[in-house]
Amino acid sequence: MSAFNITINLDLNPRVETEKKKGKRVRKRTGHVKNRRLLDTKSKQKSSNLWKERSKCGAAQSHQNGALTRHPSARTSTQPKTCPPHRTAALSQAASLLAASTHRQAASIPTWSTDVGCSPSGAAPPSAGIPSKYLALDCEMVGSGPKGSVSQLGRCSVVSYDGDVVYDKFIKPPVPVTNYRTRWSGIRPRNLANATPYAAARKEILRLLAGKVVIGHAVHNDFKVLSYCHPPALTRDTSRIPLLNAKAGLAATECASLKRLTKAIFNRDIQTGKGGHSSVEDARATMELYKVVEVEWEKQLAS
């Protein structure tokens, strides 16, 4: 009978086994921490990119609409916030409609007087580039009808506050001229041969006067040949100002001529010679007279 030797090693160290298990748990926990940090980093990066896209979209809309807009505060949600093309187009269309509506409302506001007898027909909105809100107006007339007794517009001049010529044209009346009144108007037949037609000139002139303070000497005569009535609050007639008469040494109620006032206040002669009047010269003289009493006159009107 053979003998078998069985050797059993029962020396199991429980401490070594425990350390092995603990090492596995530490490695597993470390892996979880790394994965969590990686996920947090990706989430923050995604949120940052999303906010940048949202800001770009908002800036594009603001630029397209022509105005700066305030962007909403940052949201904590990670859902993407985009600007669909159809929404951008709708916003642009709405802005265009709003601008058109505003323009129509501004154009519809009348700038002329609505008093009885005033005719705003043919008046146009004020043009851009007018140098001053103060304009001096003077018109020269020719005659039509029997013996040339009916006044017709033959020349019109408008000057700025500084005396610069804004408008100066000969104007062809809509009816035959029977008296050119050259001695006073300075107008001759050749001046009206190719002159601007009355209807076209009237539109040009009223476009200039609309919304402006118009200064003239006996200016009601000028408005009459233009078939126009300017707002009284924006009209200054130097022929009816007691302040000017006082400075000229005349009676307060006297209706002095432009020539007489200019001579008395500035010691300067106008409307001389046989060539007739110059509407540019008269308009400049009228503006100069207004400036002499401007401060006092405007204070009286404001009180």
Image (cartoon, rainbow, N blue to C red):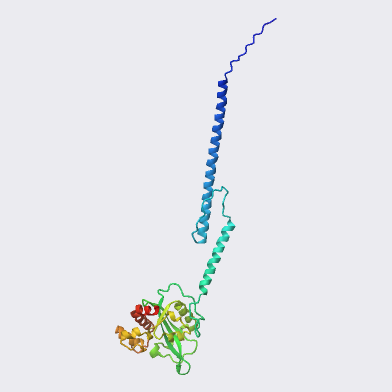
The mark tally for this picture is 0
The correct choice, above or below, for 255 with respect to 40 in the image is: below
The correct choice, above or below, for 48 with respect to 20 in the image is: below
Q: Is residue 159 visible?
A: no
Task: Give the side of residue 1 with respect to residue 142, left or right.
Answer: right
Q: Nearer the viewer, residue 200 or 205?
A: 205
Residue most extreme to the right? 1
Q: Residue drawn at (55%, 36%), measured in percent from left and top?
A: 35
Residue 70 percent across, percent down from the top left: 50, 57
The correct choice, above or below, for 28 with respect to 259 in the image is: above
Residue 11 percent across, percent down from the top left: 58, 15
Q: Is residue 156 visible?
A: yes
Quarter of the rendering containing residue 286: bottom left
Q: Residue drawn at (56%, 29%), measured in percent from left and top?
A: 25
| Quadrant assignment for the N terminus | top right
Residue most extreme to the left? 267
Residue 57 percent across, percent down from the top left: 53, 54
Quarter of the rendering containing residue 85: bottom right
Residue 200 percent across, percent down from the top left: 49, 81
Q: Nearer the viewer, residue 2 or 97?
A: 2
Task: Give the side of residue 163 with respect to residue 210, left or right.
Answer: left
The correct choice, above or below, for 204 with respect to 181 in the image is: above
Residue most extreme to the bottom? 147
| Quadrant assignment for the C terminus | bottom left
